[in-house]
């Protein structure tokens, strides 16, 4: 176990494989169908989530990990030799995860634990966790890592498009009539990160227009800056994601080794199957 452990919740969209490869401990967001509770990335993924949603015709509730779940994760890494922890949490604007981690931190007086409110979601949070690991491996202190992560928010951009208004209607975010009309007109909402939340930026018509608009928005955010890292994210839409990546690479330069990952159930339940998007970490 490295001297500084890195922990994140599963809303960071890091796959289990990528997290394990970078020695990042994931604490699951919970997905609750009535009295049944599932742990994101453990016993439910995006495909299983929407199979269940479409079968039942209702959305589950999501819940932050409990303080006990964070306490267990903190204890495990301390028991295996860590002397400090960086815990990167999904934005406190959309989840009680950060608060739960802070509560757990109090159970370890005198131990070095830094709980970070990322103020972002999905792979934007994931890139923060990966940066924490990179810096820790390079010998950085907890103070240095914390300072770097808190300065990353302004360099991270996310744009995504939804394939349908169906799941927004199921969650009460739009009316059923509006969703029905929107689907008839092939409306594709475009989302972005704003003030710690996923926010509706605009609506476009047709899949082709949405794909084009995503590329335009991503390119506009880059301008003349270097793209240091890129992630392409989706909810059960690998073919559409491949098309988006091809269009992005034709428009501007992104690293050859980009991350390809699912949105993760804690987030995808709010956007729906067919969602595609990208997260970019821009140079300073």
Image: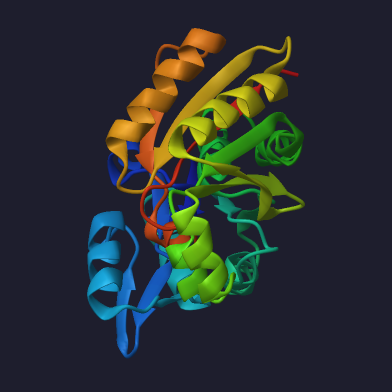
Foreground pick, 189 / 66: 189
Q: Position of residue 105 (x, y in %)?
A: 61, 67
Would you place residue 25 above or below residue 100 in this image? above
Q: Residue at x 55, y 76 (%)?
A: 172
Q: Position of residue 278 (x, y in %)?
A: 51, 33
Q: How many marks?
A: 0
Foreground pick, 233 / 101: 233
Q: Is residue 1 visible?
A: no
Q: Quadrant of residue 207?
A: top left
Q: Quadrant of the C terminus?
A: top right
Foreground pick, 106 / 154: 154
Would you place residue 251 above or below residue 135 in this image? above
Would you place residue 61 above or below residue 125 in this image? below
Q: Looking at the image, which residue sits at the far bottom? A: 35
Image side of residue 129 versus residue 216, left or right: left
Q: Is residue 73 visible?
A: yes
Q: Residue at x 68, y 56 (%)?
A: 197
Q: Position of residue 136 (x, y in %)?
A: 54, 32
Image side of residue 205 versus residue 222, left or right: left
Q: Residue at x 77, y 52 (%)?
A: 195
Rendered image coloring scheme: rainbow
Q: Position of residue 140 (x, y in %)?
A: 62, 29
Q: Quadrant of the N terminus?
A: top left
Q: Residue at x 50, y 71 (%)?
A: 169
């Amino acid at each position: 176990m490295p001297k500084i452990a890195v922990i994140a919740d599963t809303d960071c969209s890091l796959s289990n494989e990528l997290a394990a490869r970078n020695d990042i401990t994931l604490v699951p967001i919970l997905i609750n169908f009535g009295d049944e509770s599932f742990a994101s990335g453990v016993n439910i993924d995006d495909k299983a989530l929407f199979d269940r949603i479409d079968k039942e015709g209702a959305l589950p509730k999501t819940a932050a990990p409990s303080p006990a779940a964070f306490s267990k994760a903190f204890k495990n890494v301390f028991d295996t030799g860590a002397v400090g922890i960086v815990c990167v949490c999904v934005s406190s604007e959309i989840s009680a995860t950060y608060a739960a981690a802070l509560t757990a931190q109090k159970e370890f007086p005198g131990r070095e634990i830094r709980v970070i409110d990322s103020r972002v979601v999905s792979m934007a949070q994931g890139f923060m966790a990966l940066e924490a690991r990179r810096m820790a491996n390079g010998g950085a202190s907890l103070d240095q890592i914390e300072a770097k992560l808190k300065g990353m928010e302004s360099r991270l951009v996310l744009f995504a498009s939804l394939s349908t208004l169906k799941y927004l209607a199921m969650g009460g975010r739009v009316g059923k009539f509006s969703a029905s009309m929107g689907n008839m007109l092939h409306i594709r909402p475009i989302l972005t990160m704003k003030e710690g939340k996923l926010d509706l930026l605009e609506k476009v018509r047709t899949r082709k227009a949405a794909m084009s608009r995503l590329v335009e928005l991503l390119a506009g955010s880059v301008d003349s800056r270097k793209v240091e890292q890129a992630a392409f994210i989706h909810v059960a839409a690998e073919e559409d994601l491949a098309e988006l990546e091809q269009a992005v690479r034709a428009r501007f330069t992104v690293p050859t080794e980009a991350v390809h990952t699912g949105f993760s159930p804690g987030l995808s339940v709010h956007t729906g199957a067919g969602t595609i998007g990208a997260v970019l970490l821009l140079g300073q």
